[in-house]
Image (cartoon, grey):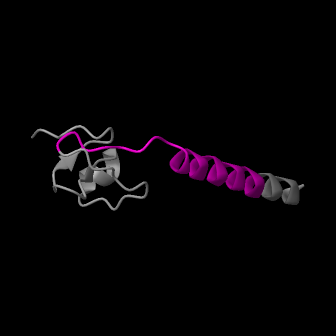
């Protein structure tokens, strides 16, 4: 009985990982609203806000962007 639950948890976790990876790999590229540079699919957040809400720093011009590529205002 306990093995069935463990097997289900492992299979569910593997399916979730595959779905999340597919979402990252097949999404449309984000472009900077300021300079038009295409941002990398795998981002490295520069702040806690970027990590939590999905922003990034533009690889081309250094502008702070939100998750959709719009320039962030303070």
Image check: 61 left or right of 68?
left
**Up/down of 50 relative to 69, above or below:** below
At 29% across and 47% down in the image, what residue appears?
55
Within the magenta stretch, is there residue 64?
A: no
Image coords of residue 38 (percent x, y):
33, 50
Image check: 42 left or right of 17?
left
At 16% across and 55% down in the image, what residue appears?
61
Secondary structure mostly taken by the magenta-highlighted segment of the chain: helix
Magenta region: 9-34
Query: Quarter-wise, where is residue 36 in the image?
Result: top left
Image check: 63 left or right of 54?
left
Task: Please tell me which residue lies in front, 31 or 13.
Answer: 31
Q: Quadrant of the C terminus?
A: top left
**Up/down of 72 relative to 62, above or below:** above
Q: In the current view of this chain or complex, which residue is farthest to the right?
A: 1
Task: Please tell me which residue lies in front, 17 or 29.
Answer: 29
Image coords of residue 22 (percent x, y):
60, 48
**Up/down of 48 relative to 28, above or below:** below
């Amino acid at each position: 009985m306990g093995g069935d639950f463990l097997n289900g948890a492992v299979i569910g976790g593997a399916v979730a990982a595959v779905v999340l990876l597919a979402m990252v790999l097949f999404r449309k590229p984000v472009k900077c609203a300021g300079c038009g540079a295409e941002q990398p699919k795998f981002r490295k957040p520069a702040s806690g806000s970027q990590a939590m809400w999905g922003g990034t720093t533009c690889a081309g011009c250094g502008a702070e962007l939100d998750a959709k590529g719009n320039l962030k205002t303070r």
